[in-house]
Amino acid sequence: MNFQKITKERMDHARSIVENGGIDSAILSGQLAQYLDSTVSEMIILGLLKQTVRNFFCVLGHGSTEIGEVLRIYQDSGLVKVYDVRNEIEASHAATAYNWVSGQHAAVITSIGPGAMQALAGSLVPASNGKGVWYLMGDETTQDEGFNMQQIPRHRQDSFLALTAAMGSAYKLHTPQSLATALRRGMNTVNHPYQAGPFFFLLPMNIQPQTLLGFNLRELPDIPPPRLGPALEGYEIAVKWIQDAKKILVKVGGGGIGASKELSNLLELTDAVCVHTPIATGVFPYQQPRCMGVGGSKGSLCGNYAMEEADLLIAVGTRAVCQSDSSRTGYPKVKHVININANQEDATHYQDTLALVGDSKATVNVLNQVLSQIPGLKSNEISDWFKRCQEKKVDWETFKQKRYDHPTLEDAFWNKSVLTQPGAIKTALDWASEKDVISFFDAGDVQANGFQIAEDEKPGKIFTDTGASYMGFAVSAILASAALSTPPYFLAFTGDGSFTMNPQILIDGVEHGAWGCILLLDNNRMGAISGLQQAQYGEEFATWDKKAIDYLQWGRSFPNVLALDGGSSPQDLISALDQAYRHPSISLIHVPVYYGPDPLGGLGVFGRWNVGNWVEETQALRHQIGL
């Protein structure tokens, strides 16, 4: 390989794309040959550029030096931006958050073996939340000369392909000429309009530097898959069930986020109330009278009441995660389900279901049109169902306000009065709403209290990974702000357990110009699990530390990180948040929070869950209901 010649050719290719404003224009101008001689690694980057992938979160190693060299040249030309980080899980979280906030796609690049394993673990988040992320991973060589260092040490072919294929769509580029097919499969996966997910592009180390002669750049795909239309049939049955029902509940998941207007009309036409999943906060303005907030094993009083009492469920764009429907016991009185979903398996999840398989927005719109033609469908009087749900919402507001009115409690570990989690989260969310910042929630009791407190008026302001509930996601998500052209301020709500899973953001966030704050709520334990143990067995075990960690000293050891004491009152916390907001880089606010038996310290649990010693009772109820 003539390294100098290849480097010059790559620089020429990149320059021609920049000067002409894109690959197609460069070909039309004659500066870039349509039938190009180049390496597999450069063709991959060209293929991703064709799909507007320009941000790469990387941990380079011996399994990815060749593609790293291509990225070096293309970054120098201004075509791509590379974010070198210190952990592949962090890279995965940042790429996921970038897609979640912006709708654009990024790629994660790893080496072979442990790095790829780390990224595979992190990919549980986009897989669970329907987010599209490219994963370019070094892989064992194709000529099988013997074990490659860091490959899975087994005498079998394509071990890592088998692993990644279990998590999502995967393709091993064993034959360079299949590159266009691999790129198309990746495009269809990460751009899927309803169930996007991770795409694992495995790149054998001996294939990456191989030269493709006369590769036709026209083969590089760039047209993503289209959306579906409305469900084709079933509306007559849906109308009959709606007419027969007296207590209608609309349960909205992530697939209904784009249909707020249509869903609001559906609520009015059917005299229904809405409960949404944590991922769909803001799909209805919380102040809308028919919005009951979240429901499930960590739901609201009013949301769980609506689920317990409804006799007809209209499920829209939800895949029925265990905590969201109380492990399939959340609707004990429902007789029929109208399930609107683009995925057939999700649409037919429940028994006694009318599956309307199609685009949620389009299908609800057609259903509304049919319903609006029926005279006298809804009385002008306020129904008993709506009235009772409103009363429960008032009870829930009173319940929450009592905790907001007592935002501090004496804590045995801290030996002083400290903020409660409801007190701290409510204060910070109100501040975030005023500043119009983006909030991310990490796993644990911070997350659960957070989505119970959230009162969003529109989607896209609060992001919470309740599908994978991955510790460390929120703090890593701050790095995505560096990749946004006009970044909003990112506020990551995290606990001490989640933060210590992925603290690399303190280095990488500063290095790459991220702008945001880590709000560290410290109860010196994994509070969600301690609380679960206490509720199930009356004892806590192996879920807390004996000594406090000086997170402020830790934060101050990193250049340009502003580490602040969040104090022990709402006023102290607001002051710290204001100071962090003025800092142009990463800030860390440490807030000691209460953990203990006082009910004012949290928002409680109102549903069921198929875990621990609750299993027998929950499973028996599920089968008794038979839904």
Image (cartoon, grey):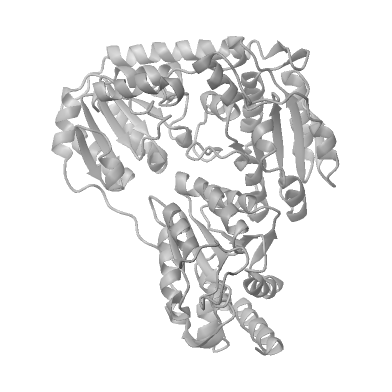
Looking at the image, residue 614 sits to the left or right of residue 314; the answer is: right
Instruction: Examine the rendered structure and indicate whether residue 183 appears above or below residue 1.
Output: above
Which of the two residues, 35 or 29, is positioned nearer the viewer here?
35
Residue drawn where x is 52% and y is 80% of the image = 25
Between 247 and 263, the one lying in front of the other is 247
Quadrant occupied by the C terminus: top left
The quarter holding residue 117 reads bottom right
Q: Quadrant of residue 420?
A: top right
Task: Tell me what residue is drawn at x 40 percent, y 26 percent.
Answer: 610
Residue 102 visible in image: no
In the image, residue 186 above or below residue 411: below
- List the single residue furthest toward the front: 155
| Quadrant location, the N terminus | bottom right
Q: Nearer the viewer, residue 111 or 196?
A: 111
Residue beneath the point at 69% across and 72% down: 72
Q: Is residue 447 left or right of residue 329?
A: right
Q: Is residue 47 visible?
A: yes
Counting from the top left corner in percent of width and height, residue 339 is at 27, 37
Q: Is residue 285 left or right of residue 403?
A: left
Residue 220, horizontal then vertical, whole percent: 45, 75
Residue under the point 45% across and 78% down? 175
Q: Residue 65: where, in percent of width, then height? A: 66, 71
Figure disc tally? 0
Observer-nearest residue: 177 or 451? 177
Q: In the rendering, at what x and y percent does residue 39 appear? A: 57, 82
Task: Report whether 518 appears left or right of 603.
Answer: right
